[in-house]
Amino acid sequence: MTAYDETCIFCKIANGEFDTDFIAESDNVVAFNDINPVAPVHVLIIPKIHITSVHELGDEHQRIWNELLVTTQAVADKLGVTDSGYRLVTNAGANAGQEVPHLHIHLLGGKKLGSLG
Ligand code: 5GP
Ligand code: ZN
């Protein structure tokens, strides 16, 4: 696994190449608004290193996974959806509709969300 994949849009975003406005940033994680939001709050939380999907996570990534979740909580608090509630989604592979092969958590909120499926 390489830390930076030069063909990956999320590696470029995490590396600051698009001057993206980060909602939160920590040592190993950044969070930013989805370019095509499906809810009033739609944030992507990603590791700075290139990990293809949640399925690629191993023991060596425990700290990063924890940081992803802690950052997600911080984003929910910052954007005011903690009390109203929110949903986390991470797609892995074709049947889930994963478009960007760099691990990301979608944080969705700000409205009553539909059922899963
Ligand atoms: P996936 O389908 O892989 O789970 O989700 C990919 C998400 O990334 C989509 O919701 C899409 O709108 C978002 N996305 C794709 N390219 C960009 C981009 O360049 N910037 C931002 N902010 N979001 C992107
Ligand atoms: Zn990447």
Image (spheres, grey):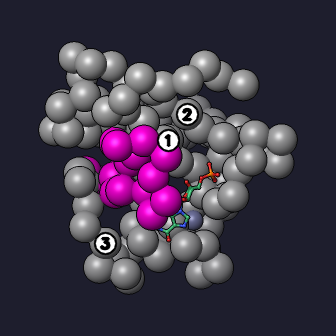
User: Is the CB–ligand 1 distance for label 2 below 8 Å?
Assistant: yes
Q: Earlier in the sequence, mark 3 or mark 2?
A: 3
Q: Is residue 46 visible?
A: no
- Residue 89's tag is 2
Question: Where does the image place residue 107, in percent across and percent down from the top left?
Answer: 42, 37
In which quadrant of the rendered view does residue 71 lie?
top left
Mark pair 1, 2: CA separation: 6 Å
- In this rendering, is residue 21 above or below 62? below
- Mark 3 belongs to which amino acid? Thr
Q: Tell me what residue is drawn at x 49 percent, y 41 percent.
A: 105
Mark pair 3, 1: CA separation: 17 Å
User: Is the CB–ligand 1 distance for label 3 below 8 Å?
Assistant: yes
Magenta segment range? 26-43
In the rendered view, does 59 fall on the left or right side of 73?
right
The quarter of the image holding the C terminus is top right
In which quadrant of the rendered view does residue 32 lie?
bottom left
- Mark 2 belongs to which amino acid? Val
Judged from the image, the secondary structure of the residue bearing numbered disc 1 is: strand
Residue placed most toward the observer, 38 or 3: 38
Q: Mark 1 — residue?
A: 105
